[in-house]
Image: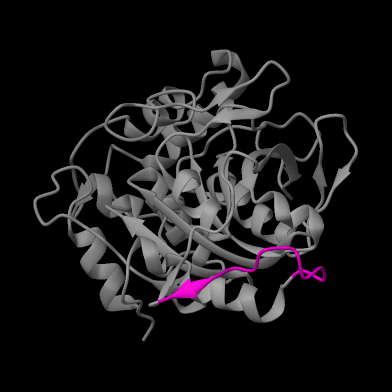
């Protein structure tokens, strides 16, 4: 029903075509996004790229402080976007940017003295920015520089990614570090989300909301049902997992999100192993917050058959549902 046929080079090929047809700069001297042999070409300077830290308002208050949580967004985009060029976005939303890090090397975000991103983990920015994309690394709520508390698969986890896509399309508010409004006038509104494990789970969840502007997702070793991830026909793989994971990815003082972790402990219902409303919130096939029937994006799912952490049934059931 919804399929894509390439990985990194093609996560954004439809996004690039949208940019070349609809987002060309008004000044003829500004480079255009170039596509040759089905691939975007590196015609923009990475060294000269613009680096920004933006905070995007979400519609939820997961930490109960009386204010809507702000999601932290670090981005790199071609300098030509200041001259009218509009570009699509590659997004990796993660809870790991200040804890275990990304990739086999455990790389974390690095910032300069002014708080702007100086070095990103992985290679997406190095590869895609010269080819005419903006790369956004988003801190999941409750992690790194985002507000809130992680709720492991439910509304708070989904909120940041969806809000950022809404911001890129003019439907949500964004702010510069000084509090002034930030808009994404440089964006075509087209987004491709990619990630592995928890990072890959978030694209599946966000796509299941039906948010407009999410064009492609590449979930790698991703969870499509948190119940299926730590249960097998009601048998527990582990106990106390959900509050443990929430605490593991949260570097704020423990008291801040203690109430959320208590709700996770109670809701997971280790005593019976039953599927309940708690798990329905964290089910992206036919759940209460995300449903596969809402997916608008093309999907390129990648999964190892020998994965003993996120078992392959999280892929097979999702693919069958698509």
Question: In the visual, does 294 lie left or right of 174?
Answer: left
Say above or below: 279 vs 241: below
Q: How is the image coloured?
A: one colour
Rendered image quadrant of residue 105: top left
Tell me, yes or no, if residue 319 can be seen here: yes
Residue 173 on the magenta segment: no
Main SS of the magenta part reads loop
Residue 29 on the magenta segment: yes
Q: Which residues are magenta?
A: 25-36
x and y percent of residue 95 in the render? 48, 35
x and y percent of residue 61 in the render? 71, 39
Kindly give the residue lying farthest to the bottom in the view shown.
1
Image quadrant for the N terminus?
bottom left
x and y percent of residue 196 in the render? 34, 47
Residue in the picture at 38% in, 64% down: 9
Image quadrant for the C terminus?
bottom left
x and y percent of residue 67 in the render? 80, 36
Say above or below: 301 vs 257: below
Say above or below: 38 vs 11: below
Residue in the picture at 64% in, 49% down: 77
Question: In the visual, does 252 lie left or right of 39?
Answer: right
Residue sitting nearer the eye, 178 or 277: 178
Tell me, yes or no, if residue 69 can be seen here: no
Rendered image quadrant of residue 103: top left
Question: In the visual, does 69 lie left or right of 158?
Answer: right
């Amino acid at each position: 029903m919804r399929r894509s046929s390439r990985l990194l080079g093609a996560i954004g090929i439809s996004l690039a075509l949208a940019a070349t047809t609809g987002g060309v700069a008004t000044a003829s001297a500004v480079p255009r996004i170039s596509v040759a042999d089905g691939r975007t070409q590196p015609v923009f300077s990475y060294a000269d790229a613009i680096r920004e830290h933006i905070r995007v308002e979400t519609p939820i208050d997961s930490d109960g402080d009386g204010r809507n949580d702000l999601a932290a967004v670090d981005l790199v985009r071609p300098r030509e976007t200041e001259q009218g060029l509009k570009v699509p976005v590659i997004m990796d939303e993660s809870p790991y940017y200040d804890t275990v890090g990304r990739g086999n090397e455990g790389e974390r975000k690095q910032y300069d003295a002014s708080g702007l991103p100086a070095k990103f983990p992985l290679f997406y920015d190095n590869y895609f920015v010269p080819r005419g994309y903006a790369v956004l690394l988003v801190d999941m709520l409750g992690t790194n520089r985002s507000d809130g508390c992680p709720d492991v698969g439910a509304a708070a986890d989904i909120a940041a990614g969806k809000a950022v896509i809404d911001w890129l399309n003019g439907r949500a508010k964004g702010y510069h570090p000084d509090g002034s409004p930030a808009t994404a006038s440089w964006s075509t509104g087209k987004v491709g989300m990619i990630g592995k494990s928890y990072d890959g789970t978030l694209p599946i969840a966000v796509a299941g909301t039906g948010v407009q502007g999410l064009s492609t997702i590449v979930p790698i070793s991703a969870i499509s049902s948190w119940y299926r991830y730590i249960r097998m026909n009601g048998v527990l793989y582990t106990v106390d997992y959900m509050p443990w994971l929430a605490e593991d990815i949260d570097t704020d003082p423990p008291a801040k999100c203690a109430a959320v972790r208590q709700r996770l402990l109670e809701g997971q219902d280790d005593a019976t192993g039953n599927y309940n409303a708690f798990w329905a919130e964290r089910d992206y096939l036919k759940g209460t917050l995300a449903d596969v029937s809402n997916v608008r994006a093309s999907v390129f799912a990648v999964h190892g058959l020998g994965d003993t952490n996120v078992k392959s049934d999280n892929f097979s059931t999702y693919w069958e549902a698509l």
